[in-house]
Amino acid sequence: MEFKAIRGVEDILPPESLRFEKVVDAFKETVELYGFKEVILPIFEEAKLFSRSVGEATDIVQKEMYVFEDKGGRVIALRPEGTASAVRAYVEHGVFAKEPFTKWFYVGPMFRFERPQAGRKRQFFQAGCEVFGLKNPGTDAELIKMASEVLKRLKVEAELEINSIGCKKCRPNYRRALIEFLREKVDSLCPTCRERLERNPLRVLDCKEEGCQAVVGGAPKITDYLCDECREHYEKVKEYLNLLGVEFKENPLLVRGLDYYTKTVFEFKSSRLGAQSTVLAGGRYDDLVKEIGGPDTPALGFAMGIDRVLLLLPKEEEKREGVFVITRGEEAYRRGLKVAEFLRSKGIKAQIDHRQGSFKAQMKAADRERAAFAVIIGEEEVEGEFFSLKELETGKQERVESLEELLGRL
Ligand code: ATP
Ligand code: MG
């Protein structure tokens, strides 16, 4: 074959695309209940926006970004995530001056040059939420509750892990303690982590290599290093999560692959996903708006990996819906074309079998299309000016005299 999609960039064909829409609908319906509004953001941006916000030293910026120069000589990146653009838009349009707080959601493709495997693609889809202007811990708890409601609605089972990774004031102390601890165990670390040790030591906590995990088990815990403000915030988040009935596990080793997080971080993980276990992840990022040139504005958010949710979504038989029109002979076909159009004008999904094969073949097609009813028009029906209506689930067939009567029976 001459052309193939790029590796890690997959087509999503029906019926999978219908499941995709279902996930997006469940997400939108849930977050709209909490007052979130959609923001539609560009797919590419100045590359610098991402290196500044996601972090120069992160895997995403170092290894995974699709960067290119456009014909005007600008250095562009396909977005690897949504938060940076949301913050840029929030600052650029002075949204902070018009709204005391802002709740946005977005849905769309993201791009990362990673090794493709199950649950890891180079073009993948995220549905995410961002909240600006609220520092209260109740916001964190409500956002996490909302995320759990999205997954619950989709019947996706995942365990929630939370942590606090502190702030500019307290994290440097922890960082120092961690580097000191890791330096002594450097021989047991994987080559990547040896390199990370000085540059991005918190990422070592997250390494999947067995040797590193063994080391990290004994590492100092960030929660022992939090300043008063961060500790109180974390305690309150947990209190409100309990109040809202959200089950969670504290994981003091939980860190995220993006540098902008402060205080609360969280992940929903599923044991059914193997190594790529995280379906939804997020946290607070109180310093980012300022770093991007806006006023000091607390913020938080999360992103759900739609591709991974699709791997977890229970398989459900497609519901029967609408009408399939079956005809035999030119006169019947002409009548059928009009019946199908009439039904659509009334908001009823309708298809007609243009091939006009045998009745049996057409019935099979109706079943394959998961129609709820077949309207059958053969010679007899043309002659007597009626329709036969068959309910496909039960096989029950009846005679219908007019279009109005047909509508009433559906
Ligand atoms: P991971 O540790 O799994 O690589 P991450 O920390 O890079 O995740 P985030 O940047 O926080 O992930 O993205 C949020 C969610 O987006 C992830 O939890 C996951 O569900 C999804 N996601 C991230 N990268 C990919 C990818 N390459 N392919 C498919 N889904 C992805
Ligand atoms: Mg990643």
Image: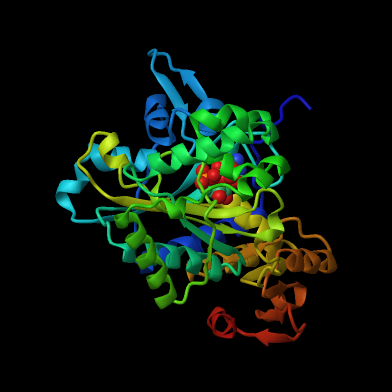
The foreground one among 146 and 386 is: 146
Q: Is residue 167 left or right of residue 273?
A: left
Indicate whether 141 appears above or below 355.
below
Coordinates of residue 122 in the picture (x, y in percent): 61, 36
The foreground one among 113 and 337 is: 113
The quarter of the displayed image where residue 52 is located: top left
Residue at point 36%, 59% (across, down): 231
Coordinates of residue 407 in the picture (x, y in percent): 55, 80
Coordinates of residue 356 in the picture (x, y in percent): 77, 60
Q: Which colour scheme is used?
A: rainbow
For the C terminus, give its image quadrant.
bottom right
Indicate whether 391 appears above or below 296.
below
Q: In this view, does 263 lie to the left or right of 296?
A: right
The foreground one among 179 and 377 is: 179
Q: Does residue 114 appear in the picture of this structure?
A: yes
Q: Does residue 258 appear in the picture of this structure?
A: no
Q: Quadrant of ligand 1?
A: top right
Q: Is residue 327 left or right of residue 409?
A: right
Indicate whether 389 appears above or below 315.
below
For the N terminus, give its image quadrant.
top right
The quarter of the displayed image where residue 186 is located: top right
Residue at point 32%, 40% (across, down): 288
Coordinates of residue 376 in the picture (x, y in percent): 72, 74
Total numbered badges shown on the rendered structure:
0
